[in-house]
Amino acid sequence: MSSMDNELALILARVQFAFTVSFHFLFPAFTIGLASFLAVLEGLWLATGKSVYANVFRYWLKIFAIVFAMGVVSGIVMSYQFGTNWSVFSDKAGPVIGPLMAYEVLTAFFLEAGFLGVMLFGMNKVGKGLHFTATCAVAVGTFISAFWILSVNSWMQTPTGYEINAAGQFVPGPSWAAIIFNPSFPYRLVHTTIAAYLTTAFAVGAVGAWHLLKDRDNPGARVMFSMAMWMAAIVAPIQIFVGDLHGLNTLEHQPVKIMAMEGHYESHPDGAPLILFGIPNSAEKRVDFAVEIPKLSSLILKHDLNAPLAGLDSVPDEDEPPVGIVFWSFRIMVGLGMAMAGLGLWSLIARASKKLYDWTWMHRAAVLLGPSGFIAVIAGWVTTEVGRQPFTVYGLLRTADSASPLDAPAVAVSLAAFVITYFAVFGAGVWYIFHLAKKPPEAHEAGLDGKPIRSAGITPAPAVIEGEPS
Amino acid sequence: MIDLTVIWAGIIGFAVVAYVIMDGFDLGIGILFPRFKVGPERDTAMNSIAPVWDGNETWLVLGGGGLMAAFPMAYAIVLPALYAPLIAMLLGLVLRGVAFEFRWRDPAHRPIWDMAFTVGSTVATFAQGVTLGALLQGITVEGRAYAGGWWEWLTPFSCLTGFGLVIGYALLGAGWLIWKTEGPLQDQAYRFASRLGIALLIVIALVSLATLRLEAQYYQRWLSWPGILATSQVPLASLIVTVLFFRSVKRRQEAAPFFYVLGLFGLCIVGLGVSIWPDVIPARVTIWAAAAPERSQVFMLIGAGILVPVILAYTGWAYWVFRGKVGTDGYH
């Protein structure tokens, strides 16, 4: 195998991982928030007895079932892809990150899967109280899953608590807490979890707004839109604040990633500008057509207008991440975050004026921002993961030294198979979600069994006979 | 002194067995699916596994994730060696997994998702069988890495094990349907069970004989004196279980056939253990050579020790909730 083949195989493996993980990430980003939303709705229903909550619950439960199934199957792929395509990384980092992933399976996946069946199909089997417990168990499971996998990811970004053995493997040091609670983990966990909640809020808000535009008196659409806008108004600003803290943490532990995000090719000994827009030109090591605000970057990152900030000129070329991708993905994420907070503010004004369900331009804006969470999540993910390059374990293990000894044709074929299957299968899934979301929430919303009266019976059978005793 | 590596080999083994037992029957229903009539029969077959398939597949994730955590070197060698079958398995699982939801959402395209359910289930099963065969026949290892090509796994033997597992899972699926359904679907499942039982018996015999010829290690384990006194109990017990299985089908017992098939699977796994123990990659790498350091083992053992019983308890509860016969529109 020539070195050019090796290089091709490496690039294909990277594309494959990026493709499969990005697709996968969309689903848990939605289910983490949606599971909590469903738990809150069911709790409100149990507490108040208002049927509108039960109807909105059933409405989103149908969508949840589809998203969750897609998340599960695309997640199984991930758990094997570490080994199939990144075997050297797995061998070397396995003793440290493997146990964390095993804990994810034991504490989260089984919990979610074990209670999902009851949550989807068991209402008439176990009664309301136990059913609510099952819903909460699924919601908690999604969060625990995020906890472990983000700990793993954070350890790859800011590795601590490890030792290196004679075989060149990373092995755990005396303290597991030092591994799990590595420096970037708390920030990444909070930032990502909030992102998941916002993703769900804007998706739910868009569906609510869409139906308000058609019928502003629809009670289900009102509940969706109002709850979503509370999230936008309260949580989006918190997210901006948390994101800032996360950025400062990155500056401390991965300054090169910040240089790429900011487009700072040059060091600025007396105050660095904030480049709002521009086209990073890595060949010439400058940002073309830059629109910048002098000294603002130093103010944001160091809280001092004149604080010096090092640039990529202080870093060897072979240790730099691809600047263009990181620069742009970061701006997409931040821009969407600002837009989300803006809609939240708008909704507060509308609410104060008692016009929350009347301002159609606000509803249109909410529909437009429906996918904003998904795009922001992927953009943020790209920022942090591409910003980690050219390493898998930051500063310690290069991506080029992490891949499996596979021939390029093998990876090319698998990549093509993934692309075709994912677009076909998940494309269909997304289409079904739109199909479900197109229908307005009804006063007697059907459960997963296609029947309005039995709250949630069993997967709907087209052959169901109305009124058959259960 | 307790050997943590042995305990971890036991836990991974347990996860694999749990997976084969639990996902085996629901993959099997996918394999048999096109043989059932469109309408109530297919709906019932699907409904009988809809609430549990997701939990069943989680054992596969535990097997894979656990292997990475407890035996990272083995994970790093085996997965690239079996690249093509494993990717095929994953794509198969994607196809069949979404079919559970999609077929109900889109009656116009139901035939497509029914086909995805069958093709996905069959491909995933065949790939798992191929994986087993490829490991048994031996893979090329150099140092800490796989050193063979990307078609090394493909031999008549690995195709035989792949084919064998398709029959085995289909039989498990038939057993499950006998237990969980009634009427024409159950009648059909009884018919399948008889035929698949005979086919499985033939395949097990072929695989067993072929395995003996693969490595000197296997041959000696099974046939050297006096070990043969112990090892011969495995085929003898298999024979007895097979007889009981056919008798239970003939007497139209409802739960027994499924559990006899499980017993047969259990004996096959015991037989596998006889051949390969204590290797994590058969005849290549032992569990001790591939083991993670003690700190990793201890940390995970605490979690597994507490959580696996809890998981078994609530998984058992979920099965209990959906106990009894299943009808076309769910559980009555």
Image: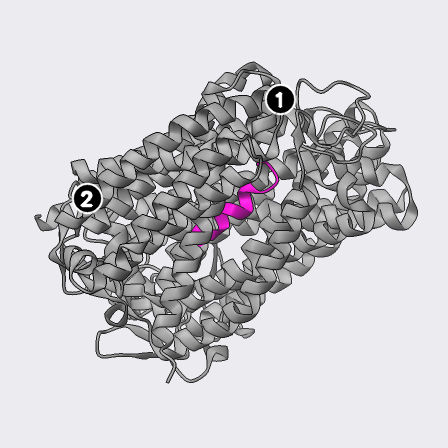
Chain of the residue on which disc 1 is drawn: B
Q: Which residue is drawn at 56% across and 66% down?
A: B307
Question: Is A194 displayed left or right of B33 in the figure?
Answer: right
Q: What residue type is labelled 2?
A: Leu
Residue B291 lies, in percent from the top left, at: 30, 70
Is residue B327 or residue A69 the one in the foreground? B327
Is residue A186 or residue A470 the one in the foreground? A470
Q: Say which element carries label 2.
A: helix
Q: Say which element carries label 1.
A: loop
Question: Is A351 displayed left or right of A257 in the figure?
Answer: right
Residue A406 lies, in percent from the top left, at: 19, 48
The residue at which mark 2 appears reads as: B209
Q: What residue type is labelled 1?
A: Gly
- Magenta-colored span: B49-61
Magenta run includes residue A21:
no
Residue A167 lies, in percent from the top left, at: 22, 74
The residue at which mark 1 appears reads as: B183
* Few, some or many residues within 10 Å of mark 2 (<14, 14–19, 20+): few
Q: In this view, does B134 lie above or below B35?
A: below
Is residue A268 or residue A10 the one in the foreground? A10
Would residue B294 be seen by someone viewing this image from the given angle? yes
